[in-house]
Amino acid sequence: MGLGESQEAEFSLVAGLPAGTYALVCDGIILRGVDVTFELLRRRGDEDTTIGASTVRFEPRGGGNFDAVPCDLTFDAPELDFMPGDEFIFRYSATNTTAIAYVPNGDGALFNGRIPNITLPQ
């Protein structure tokens, strides 16, 4: 993921999204200092509605330590209606690097962190 590039995970919605707090765990392996913007979106056709967005500054642990750096975010959002074809999007992008600097911790406890996940409001 270089400067201006993003990674997205899309999920097809089957109902609207309730109002409430979305909790995002985004622990990552940090290879160099980087600012990462995390976004939750509802995509309808070509239009994205932002549920929440936040930019986090990460620094590597140093000394060759590749343990995950913890990150917890919450977003309060209003109810969003539903139309067939709507998608729920998790997107992250680096804003100040041209090389890979943030890697989501897909190995969880093996790197002393958590696997990234999203908790939807009930």
Image: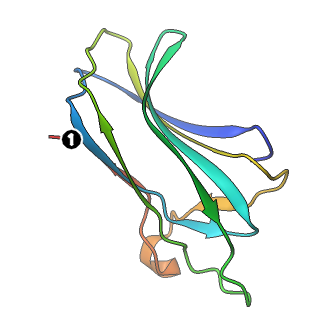
Position of residue 100 relative to residue 82, above or below, is below
Q: Quadrant of the C terminus?
A: top left
Residue pictured at 31% horizontal, 24% vertical: 13
**Residue found at the very far bottom of the displayed protein:** 63
- Relative placement, left or right, of 81 versus 98 is left
- Relative placement, left or right, of 94 versus 111 is right
Residue pictured at 48% horizontal, 70% vertical: 70
Indicate the secondary structure of the residue bearing disc 1.
loop
Image x and y of residue 108, in percent: 45, 71
Position of residue 122 relative to residue 61, above or below, is above
Q: In the rendered structure, which amino acid carries the disc numbered 1?
A: Pro
Residue 91 quadrant? top right
Image x and y of residue 85, in percent: 38, 12
Position of residue 66 relative to residue 114, above or below, is below
Identify residue for label 1: 121
Image x and y of residue 36, in percent: 63, 51
Residue 34 quadrant? bottom right
Residue pictured at 54% horizontal, 74% vertical: 68
Residue pictured at 27% horizontal, 14% vertical: 82
Position of residue 78 relative to residue 5, above or below, is above
Q: Residues within 10 Å of mark 1 (few under 14, many from 20)?
A: some
